[in-house]
Amino acid sequence: MKTTLTLLALATLLCACQKQPDHVHLHEPAAEHAEHGEHPPAAALGQHQHGIAQLALLQQQQQLLLSATLPAETLWGFERMPNTAAEHAQVERGLKQLTAGHRFFRLLGNGHCQPQSVEIIKPAGLTDPNANHMEVNANWLWQCQDPAQVTGFSTDLFKHYPALQQLQAQILLEQVNHGAVLDKHNNQVEW
Ligand SMILES: [Zn+2]
């Protein structure tokens, strides 16, 4: 349990760092162009940008933690307090999908890892009528027999979330320090 807490604390720290500067809003005309294939320059790591999620893979002893920060807009289409029963249901569905999120990832190699626990941190803005922009933080924990034998991962997130365009990943394992940018054409990273 202590290990889990330490990893989660580290994930929270990373998450906090990544939130500066805050909120690049992409409902600007420039962003509309991006959706039609004209990609603007990549945003600096960690900026809140619709369609772009941050991922950190962290290790403590035999545990691997995947910590994701996902714009709510990319998950369920809006970033404000849900107003109708349908919108509430949409948000609940989105959060529930993430609780089963281990299945969105395949750890490569012979680490013999088993899903262990999950923590989904709901955006505070879901109950704030003045909220705009929000992110969901998801932490998926695996217990591995031999984490040094984990040699990469692939993800199905792009299939499940068509609005997701890019995953900016940081792999910070005991013997690996690696960054990668994934998208639907390149949904795997190896190290
Ligand atoms: Zn936003």
Image: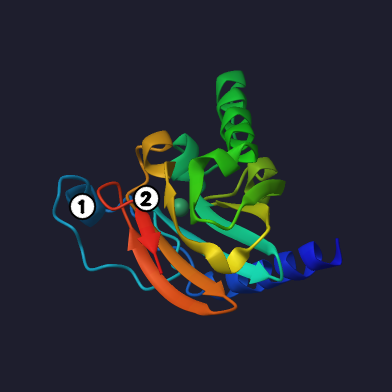
- Residue at image position (41%, 38%) is 161
| Snapshot quadrant of residue 82 | top right
Name the residue tied to disc 2. Answer: 51
For the N terminus, give its image quadrant. Answer: bottom right
- Residue at image position (50%, 77%) is 176
| Snapshot quadrant of residue 65 | bottom right
**Does residue 73 lie above or below 83 as drawn?**
below
Q: Are marks 2 and 1 in contact (CB under 8 Å)?
A: yes
Q: Position of residue 113 (x, y in %)?
A: 63, 52
Q: Is residue 105 visible?
A: yes
| Front residue of 12 and 183 | 183
Residue that extends furthest to the right in the rendered view of this protein: 1
Q: Is residue 25 visible?
A: no
Here the colouring is rainbow
Amino acid carrying mark 2 in the image: Gly
Q: Position of residue 72 (x, y in %)?
A: 51, 45
**Does residue 34 lie above or below 102 as drawn?**
below
Assign a secondary structure to mark 2: loop
Report whether 151 appears left or right of 137. Answer: left
Q: Which one is earlier in the sequence, the residue at label 2 or at label 1?
A: 1
Name the residue tied to disc 1. Answer: 34
| Snapshot quadrant of residue 80 | top right
Q: Position of residue 33 (x, y in %)?
A: 17, 50
Assign a secondary structure to mark 1: helix
- Crowding at label 2, few (<14), some or many (≥20) Cα neighbours within 10 Å? many
- Residue at image position (65%, 67%) is 11
For the C terminus, give its image quadrant. Answer: bottom left
Q: Is mark 1 within 8 Å of ligand 1?
A: no
Q: Position of residue 126 (x, y in %)?
A: 64, 42
